[in-house]
Amino acid sequence: MTRDSNEQSAIAQMQERYRQERDRRQVFTGRGALDLTGELAGYLEDHFTPAAPREPLFDEVDALCIGAGFAGLLAGARLREAGLGRVRLVDSAGDVGGVWYWNRYPEAKCDIESLIYMPLLEELDYVPTERYATAPEIFAHAKRIAEHYRLYDDAVFHTTVTEIRWDDAAERWQVLTDRGDAMVTKYLLICNGPLSKVRLPDIPGIEDFKGKAFHTSRWDYDYTGGGPGDPRMPKLADKRVGFIGTGSTGLQCVAPLAEAARELFVFQRTPSTVAVRDNRPIDAAVVRGWPKGWQKRRQENFTRINFGAPVEEDLVKDGWTELYGTMLASPTYRGLTGEALAAEKDRIDFMMMERIRARIDGIVNDPETAERLKPYYAYFCKRPGFHDEYLAAFNRPNVTLVDTGGGGVERMTETGVVVAGRQYDLDLVVFGTGFETETAGRLRLGFEVSGRDGLDLREKWRKGLTTQFGMMIARFPNLFMIPGVNGQAVVTANVVHMTQEYVAHIAHVIAAAEARGAATVEVTDAAEKAWVDTILDRRIDRTAYLEACTPGRNNYEGNVAARPLQNVTFGGGPVEFFEILRRWREAGDFQGLAFDLRHAAQPAVLDNQPAG
């Protein structure tokens, strides 16, 4: 496949433009995110559910899941099906739902088709109302799962885990919390996911601002008016509002804020890609007429297309599959190798980004604003964005785009935000800055983990992650992790699909341990090393690509070199990875695991248990 010289020149010129845009933003790299403790702890306050007082718990359960989002709910559901009696969810939120408990900002929706994103639809006989469901509907479905599988029975909320430690003598995990709990469990599942730790940018003077400020995951409707599902927000009619962040959250928040506020200032470090969303109602009768197993088939079809695996039909047909299926996964490109394939990918990327930039010109009236909204980086540098109202909001006379030139907000004062020496006086500042997902060099669990003989997990992982399949860790028996972005497993656009695959594997192992009457199940050192070797052998070196991207979540704010070589996803992609897990389970020999079949030890001695 050949390209003419004009096209080659255009691509080369654009790649140079990308480099310049990256270099402009490198100044922001060292700023990082704030530790939300002390006087900044108010940014984590729960406005939605009052915390009820309770006595500390010193009881024992069969399994405990840290996190009650979809990972914890799916784990709880499958453990119930595996026959476990007491399954406890622990979460700092006031209810189940995880990110969908917290994300109640106006017009919050999923950006993956709800038919493949919302789990257990067939099991609960539920059909979403829209192709991209709203946050209230997704939150209601999370509660529906908890009710159906009786996961509220032993759940504890407004509770933050501070430490977990393995009791060698009792062969149990002890879970300590900020509520004085010292709970004991046989199986411990860490399910707190990649979107659980609020990210607030390290802006000088952020503590000095005297107006109202909150993160989008702690939306204060008492201040704005309106409510989840009601984006009108009448109390902002006389307010000057600043919004910081133009990622996926910003794409959804800006339009309703533009409708509500007297003035809205959108502070942009790097523009997002904004492709067509095309949300619409779902015909429940049609969905209920599909053959049994439709959700799993649809999820697998979506994932296969997104990673270039052949399919007979595109079942989802959305912006994700258009790019991956119609363009990158096209059979036309499968015969190309080496330089020819790399060049063709450059061409496809260039075409996609040109379409996105042209869409901005077709919607935004002011040429200068349109130019500032155009993203200049390779498409896969950031998670793709989709929205049908975001760009048009900048045509409103009350909306101002404040492009920070890549440097971010300079500082905050008592009355507002400063960019390039100019102050913008504001009544409200909203941080749409997301969650920490790829912060290099940090274990984002938020609590201490001690395994056999007091081995500290941070110390074990000091030079890099060591796991089997990203889910089990040698010398940490009966402990299972739902892998995050750095988890030696895989990452897919549809987080729920990959979570379901992980949970199915974990539940299979726990069911086998229970069937054997095992006190513990643990990965051997040899099996852990073998998987780390596999990760390294199959590693795809994306350093050059990521270093060419503007700083952001995908390249650790430009600090690519800080990540250990083994802290990467499986290079073969999710289709192959899920097949590896399936074959491992079907083999039936539980290769790499050691089951302790001795008679279980005596019950744990519980710290801080009251006398009597």
Image: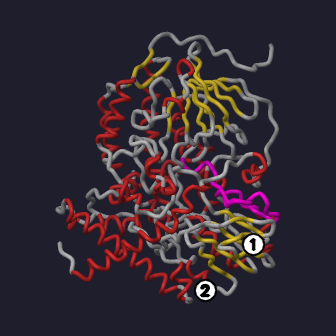
**Front-lying residue, 535 or 579:** 535
Q: Which mark is residue 395?
A: 2
Magenta span of residues: 194-220
Residue appearing at x 31%, y 33% in the figure: 586
Q: Amino acid at mark 2?
A: Asn
Q: Which mark is residue 233?
A: 1
Of callouts 1 and 2, the N-terminal one: 1
User: Residue 240, image x and y in percent?
Assistant: 76, 76
Where 167 falls versus 338 (above or below)? above
Q: Inspect the magenta stretch and tell me whether residue 206 lies in it.
A: yes
| Crowd rating for badge 2 (residues with CA inside 10 Å; few <14, some 14–19, many 20+) | some
Residue 464, quarter of the rendered image: top left
Where 361 falls versus 601 (above or below)? below
Q: Inspect the magenta stretch and tell me whether residue 63 lies in it.
A: no
| Crowd rating for badge 1 (residues with CA inside 10 Å; few <14, some 14–19, many 20+) | many
Quadrant assignment for the N terminus: bottom left
